[in-house]
Amino acid sequence: MAALTTNRLTTFYGDAPARRTVAMKGGVRIFKGAQVAIDSSGFARPAGLSAAGGVRVVGVASAEYDNTAGADGAMKCELTVGVFKFLNHGADLVTAASVGADCFVVDDQTVALTNGAATRYVCGKVQSVDADGVRVFIA
């Protein structure tokens, strides 16, 4: 899979999503429906491999946010937490045996079974696995 290049309708499962607001990293664009991580300084960025700077997934973007011309903290983004369905990485599939365990970020819309030799950080807890994706709880 590849990181998002446009907004995505990320299906939410549950009654009422909870929301939080986080200051954004400078020079980044976050698409609606993307997994959002914070970096070691606490700024939001699109989730991706550890080398991209993220350390922990904190929610899914409620809208599109473009801070490509701004500095760290110049803009805030609203995130939703709860259970969402993401794409399953074909080469490192999350399976039904993973329910209740952590899954790991590949990019801002894809999760994998393993941490990829410590190149991926935790996305959240696997809730279920379907033919078209993985339901993940992000707190």
Image (cartoon, rainbow, N blue to C red):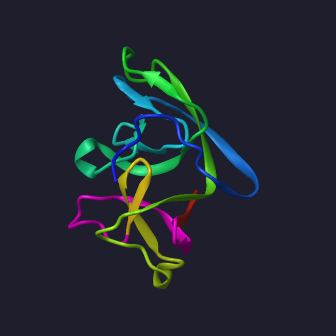
Residue found 41% across the figure and 56% down from its top: 110
Quadrant, the C terminus: bottom right
Residue 106: name its quadrant.
bottom left
Residue 130 position within the rendered picture, expressed as x and y whole percent measured from the top left: 55, 72
Residue 117 is covered by the magenta coloring: yes
* Vertical position of residue 56 compared to residue 117: above or below: above
Residue 46 position within the rendered picture, expressed as x and y whole percent measured from the top left: 40, 40
Residue 23 is covered by the magenta coloring: no
Pick out the residue farthest to the top: 69
Pick out the residue farthest to the bottom: 97
Residue 87 position within the rendered picture, expressed as x and y whole percent measured from the top left: 46, 59
Q: Nearer the viewer, residue 129 or 81?
A: 129
Compared across the picture, whether 51 is left or right of 105 comes to left
Compared across the picture, whether 62 is left or right of 115 comes to right
Q: How many marks?
A: 0
Compared across the picture, whether 17 is left or right of 90 comes to right
* Vertical position of residue 7 compared to residue 48: above or below: above
Q: Which residues are magenta?
A: 113-133
